[in-house]
Structure formats: structure tokens, C-alpha cells
Amino acid sequence: MGGYGGAEESIISRRVESIEESATLKMTDLARAMKAEGKDVISLSSGEPDFDTPSHIKEAAIRALNEGHTHYTPSMGIPELREAICEKLRRENGIDAEPSEVIVTPGAKHAIFEAVTTLVDEGDEVILIGPAWVTYEACVRYAGGKAVYVNTSPEEGYIPYDVGEYITPKTKLVILNSPCNPSGAVYPPEVIREIAELSIDHGFFVLSDEIYEKIIYEGKHLSAGSIAPERTITVNGFSKSYAMTGWRLGYVHSNEDMIHQMLKVHQYIQACASSISQWAALGALRGSQKCVEEMREMYRKRRDVLMDELKKIGVKCVRPKGAFYAFPDVSSFGMDGNTLSQKLLERGVITVPGSSFGERGKNHIRISFSASVENIKKGIAIMKNVIER
Ligand code: PLP
């Protein structure tokens, strides 16, 4: 008997069956659902700014609506925005970008999917720096590739010093994410430089996810694309820097050939990013950057509060130098990250278990400090009760 639907054979593709629901989104959705049920919830799981989008950006979107920018745009994005992105890449990142090398995407996540599926074939190896954001491994698996983890340690501040040892002839891609979600590490420029130079020597690509670039408290950002422009795919977006998660807008830069190949994927799954969001993003890039600094300084204060509170209750945690996450080790309290996260959940505090970011994260939880000082203090007080029981 042919056909699908029998007891043994799944009709779902092996690619989709090989991936799981996003652990971070699952926790965020859970927090939302609990709030909707009227429960008292302290959400320390959120991967998004808790600030409103700055008003000058909203006004740019309203203008776009009123001017009738409500149709498909060129698939790569409106020329005005691509030009503004190139100016930003040249000025801030040392990347000599041209508009023909940029695709505007519906979020950085989409750009990552496009990049990974454009490059990775069955059996190709992709190096991820662990602990790594959940999306990378899912995209690699979906494309049929193999995720190879370079595990970093809290003792070394989660910095990947030994990427070179993991390169094989099958290495197609190394994914860098500095500042890092979930560890908050900001990789020193010399580490990024070395990996970029390895890409030239060995012929692999670096996907540099720079979405938290503007949220750095200590350390200096270096774009791999300024060292190895022919071998780098730079991904960035507006979600985190400008509190624009709901607008779904990101972009990708690489050499023209790579962009041409990625555009094929882009065109069949998305046509173009939202027109209104693109005009809003143009407003973000062309407008005052004071809002970015103000939000960063708020995160810094919250980080300092969180670190003080964790210290008071004896929780070990590397001080995050960027992004808005802390990744404490909770093993000294006789439990792993899954157990603690579950116990906190039962008391209304939402975090993300560290195992979601790779096997080595299992003794950790991820705490987002994109939350009010009051909620951070309340959440850690509840954590104190849980670990002291
Ligand atoms: N890259 C990293 C490391 C992230 O943490 C996130 C969101 O959590 C993204 C990319 C996604 O950004 P966007 O909202 O632009 O899709």
C-alpha cells in the first residue's frame, strides 16, 4: 500500500520533525497566557525591550501610511532604507557596503534563516558558540547540517578562544553573536579578528549576528565584516536597539553574489518586508540616536541591580557586558536549570532553562533584565525562597 498517513510513516517532513518549538518563545507565550488569566506574573524571560518604540519612529510610520506606502516594495527593500543602512555600516562598522549588497528582511531571524538555508547542505558543519541562541541550531538542523558546538566557559567569560580547533573540511559556517544571547558576553576584538581571518584561510563563511550591538556596557564591538568582507554575512535589525520587535524589521549584508543567492530564498517566502515598517526603520536610522543611549543606560542600571541581588543570595553569575540577559549557574543549590526554572514558574516567575541554549547550559537559567527594577527585585526574592528550601 502506498501513500502516507499510515501508523508508522509520518507525513511531516524529517526536516521539520528534527526541530522543536522555540524554548524562549514558549516561555514568553506562557507568561502572556498566565497574565491573561489574571495571574500575578513576573516575566524575566522576555527577549524584547520593555520600552515603547520612540515617538519619532512611530511618526515616520504614520507619515508612510498617510502617504500611501501600503504596497509591496522592491524585494530587497526600499532604496532609501538600503542606502541609510549602508551609511550606517560604513560609519559605525567599517563595512564598505553598497545597496546592492543589502536585503531588508522581516526581522533578523528571517535573515538568519535565509543565510543558513542558502549556505548549508546535508552533512555540512556549522560552528556555534555555546551557549548559543536557540534559533541557530534549529536553522542548521532544518537545512540538514550538523551543529558543532564550541563550548565556552563562565571562567573564561564565555569567550570562544579556540574556534580554530573545531574547523574541518566540512565547516561551511561559523555563527558569531556578540553581544551574546544568553551569556551577555562581548567578544574582544582580537577574538573576532582571528575568527574572521580563519574564514579567509579556510574558505568558510562567518554569520555575524549583531542585533545587540547597541546594547554594550563594557567592551568594544568589532564587525567581522570589516576584517573579512568577502567571507562575512552581517545580520542586524531594529528590534532591540530601537524597541521595535513588533515591527519585524532586520537586514543582511554580504557580498553581491551571496546576496543574489539569498534573495531567491527571500523572494519565495516573503516577497518583501513590511512597507510601513521599512519607512519607520528609515526614521529610526535618520533620527536622533539619543533614545538608543537612554535605553542602554536603563538596561545598565537594571543589570547592576540584578547582579547585586544575585550576589546577595549567593548565586554565581558572570557579569553581562552586553545584551539584556544574565546566565547564572545554579548547580550549587542542588538543582539544575530546568528544575529551578520550573519551581520559579510555579511561583509566577518566568525564566528560560539554560539547557535550551545547548547541553552545557543545563546548570543555568537565563534571566532577562528587560524588566522593571521592581520586578527584578521581586523575582530574585522569590528565587531566594526557592533555593533556600
Ligand atoms: N538574534 C538574536 C541573538 C536574538 O536574541 C534575537 C531575538 O531574540 C534575534 C536575532 C531576532 O531579532 P528579530 O526580532 O530582528 O528577528
Image (spheres, rainbow, N blue to C red):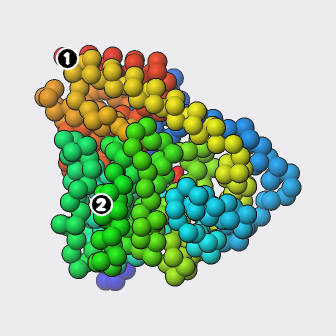
Residue at screen point 31% across, 83% down: 1
Residue 200 seen in the figure = yes
Q: Nearer the viewer, residue 342 or 316?
A: 316
- Residue 128, which numbered label? 2
- Residue 344, x across and y down, in percent: 31, 26
Residue at screen point 40% across, 22% down: 305
Spatial CA span between label 2 and label 1: 35 Å
309 vs 206: above or below: above
- Residue 388, which numbered label? 1
Asked if residue 6 lies left or right of residue 250, the reply is left
Sequence order check, earlier mark of 2 and 1: 2
Asked if residue 320 lies left or right of residue 248, the reply is left
Q: Nearer the viewer, residue 371 or 385?
A: 371
Asked if residue 102 lies left or right of residue 40, the reply is right
Instruction: Say what secondary structure mark 1 lies in.
Output: helix
Instruction: Say what secondary structure mark 2 lies in.
Output: strand
Amino acid type at mark 2: Leu
Asked if residue 217 lies left or right of residue 168, the reply is right
Answer few, some or many: residues within 10 Å of disc 1's Cα (few below 14, many 20 plus, some between 14 and 19): few
